Amino acid sequence: MVNVHLRCDETTGEFRAGVSGVYRCGSPWLCPVCAVWKALARAEKVKDVAKATFGRGGQVGLLVLTASHSKGMSLADVKKLIQNASSNARKGRAWINAQDVYGILGVVVGQEVTYSRVNGWHYHQHLCIPVDGPTDEEKAHAGEDAALLEVLVRERAEKAARWLAASYKDQIRARGGKVSDRHGCRVRVADDWEDASGYTAKGSMAWEVSGGHKDVTKAASSMTPWDVAAAAIDGDAFMMQRWREYVDVMPGTRTCVVSAALGTKLDIPASESKEGEQELHERDDIVGRVGAPIWRRWMRFGLAATFLSRVEYGGAEGFADAVDATERDADTVVARRVYEEDTLRSIVEEVFCGATVVRLDCKRADDRIPFETAEQAIREAKMRAVREADRRQRKPHGCLVVLPDGDKAPARRARAPTS
């Protein structure tokens, strides 16, 4: 059984729901289940930073750091380049002066990685930059105009983020890397604490699993680590190598750490030196229990957070209603997935007509790769589009064709007539 707890936060007075009795490996990089709850925990930490900053009249600058990369670069090299440049941009006398000039309280760094079949590994960082409340000069300039005062502080937060972006670019170039002045860094100011939290902490790889909470539009060639793992499981040898590379590099990477100095300035808890341990809850905090199979079902469908929100809203009295409502949501998800599966299957059968995929350079007829599921067919279609784009840029070593079932031999590349 999974125990559901409802505890009152001593700092904010808000009731927050949680669970115990669930085994977790604690890895946000290798486990799709832990990626979700770790993302939620990170979001809570960044939310605390943003709330405390806004509470003292400050603002939060947001910054994305990237660098130019190619398919031939290893994940370790891309990560090392960006991490070192980002870290060194926040060291030395210039950084100390910038903190004084812009009122920078600290920086929280969120780390994320995706993969592109065209451009390779795309490691990047999301920075949350809280700046302090109004200065004496800003107060004097704004007078009694509260709206103008907020604008002045927002402008200072944006300047702080732009200063850090410029320092980062200098560090990248000093290490022989390349970064676009136009697209290498993206700067803006958070609209509110929820914006700051979602922007910095959650990450697309967690929401890919949990049900798409983050609105991300991806090209067919852009893949989260879970996409890489799925392709590897389906037999893609190249993706298997990429997954092993990812496993060697990313585990152990800490993200969204609230430093002791920042925690002290904002009077909030700093991040633990060691993460991954479960919290222990007192038994008198338990408001109900859910069967493990039901909980796993909700986790698989991305409904666990929805259920906990319902418990926070309805309390112990509304626990049964929260369970019933979440189970209805799960049934809806199942029905929708069945419908989508049937629709996809009918489209695939109509388009491919039971055909078999075979590479032109296959040596044997049994090298053909049959479509076993609609998902495989859709994934294969996306891969074809990427390969076709690659083929147009260079001479192909092999390509894909569709042959009707029953053909005895794969197609061969036609030979040019000889004189």
Image (cartoon, rainbow, N blue to C red):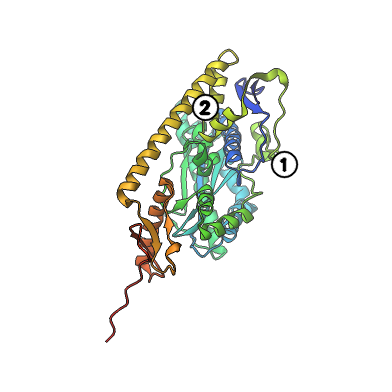
Residue at image coords 44%, 70% = 363
Quarter of the image for residue 320 reads top right
Q: Which mark is residue 306?
A: 2
Q: Nearer the viewer, mark 1 or mark 2?
A: 2
Can residue 148 be spotted in the picture?
no
Q: Earlier in the sequence, mark 1 or mark 2?
A: 1
- Residue 306 place in picture, x, y as percent: 52, 27
Position of residue 145 relative to residue 284, above or below, is: below
Residue at image coords 66%, 37% = 24
Can residue 242 be spotted in the picture?
yes
- Residue 216 place in picture, x, y as percent: 43, 42
Please name the residue that numbered disc 1 is placed on. Answer: 273
State how far apart marks 1 and 2 are (Cα): 30 Å
- Residue 18 place in picture, x, y as percent: 63, 26
Q: How many marks?
A: 2
What amino acid type is highlighted by mark number 2? Thr
Q: Which mark is residue 74?
A: none
Q: The residue tagged with tag 1: helix, strand or loop?
A: loop
- Residue 269 place in picture, x, y as percent: 68, 33
